[in-house]
Image (spheres, grey):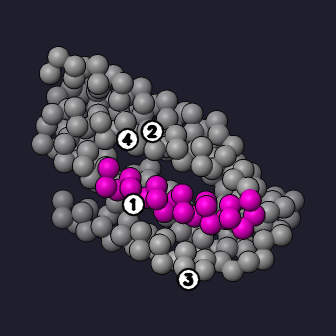
Amino acid sequence: RTFVPWMVALSLIGIVYGALAAMAQSDWKRLLAYFSLSHLAMATLGLFALTPLGITGSILQQINHGISIAALFLLVGMVDERRHTRTIAEYSGLAQVMPVCAVTFVVMAMSSIGLPALNGFVGQALILRGVFAVNRWWAVAGASGTNAKVTSSANVARRNSPVVPVSKYGKSHRSPLTRKLTSPDVPATHAASIHPRADLATVSGRYRSTAR
């Protein structure tokens, strides 16, 4: 227990730093890497709360993170394989040419940041409840870091959303990548890897929310 305050402090720093660093990225894989840092820092926060709720939430957070972040990396890798770019700005208007890919990306991103009714919510909620039982200020700081992560995601989505409709912003908003991208939406080989993760994120999130 001597090192618990230090590990909690490092976890809180990791949560906030990962979220803020992600906001500054222009590369999708770098952004996802910093989000991973923030998510796993949340898991260590719950682990070092040393409460049953915190530890349970930490385990769920790690499992759910593996589901969500793997799907996001697969989706980015799929588009990168076709167009050889990971620049966030190049993905604007992606829903116009790859609607299934874009919608799946948004669902998994919302799962990753902990939207209620998706799998990422329950783990984070248990972590914060477990931490609150030990020290309310640790829980407040952890929740603030979660808010920073949500703000970062919303900021990136607002500037370079993959689901921005062209009719709303005009053709100039549609990136050169999406204007030239004519390949199929999600091939069967990729769908076999991505869609089960999306289904698991939605079904397990609803089941756990109902169970609680």
| Disc 1 target residue | 67
Q: Secondary structure at mark 4?
A: helix
Q: CA distance from mark 3 to mark 2?
A: 31 Å
What crowding class fits label 4: few (fewer than 14 Cα within 10 Å), some (14-19), or many (20 or more)?
A: many
Secondary structure of residue under mark 3: helix
First reached walking from the N terminus: tag 2 or tag 1: 2
Q: Residue at x 29, y 34 (%)?
A: 45
Q: Amino acid at mark 2?
A: Leu
- Mark carried by residue 37: 2
Q: Residues within 10 Å of mark 1 (few under 14, many from 20)?
A: many
Q: Residue at position x 49%, y 35% from top? A: 18
Q: Which residue is mark 3?
A: 188
Q: Amino acid at mark 1?
A: Ile
Q: Which residue is at a point 22% across and 23% down the rendered structure image? A: 4
Residue 75 shows in the view: yes
- Amino acid carrying mark 4 in the image: Leu
Name the quadrant of the C terminus.
Answer: bottom left
The residue under label 4 is 40
Q: Are marks 1 and 4 in contact (CB under 8 Å)?
A: no
Magenta-tinted stretch:
62-84
**Observer-nearest of 110 and 74:** 74
Pointers 2 and 4 in contact (C-beta within 8 Å)? yes
Which badge, 4 or 3, is on the more N-terminal residue? 4
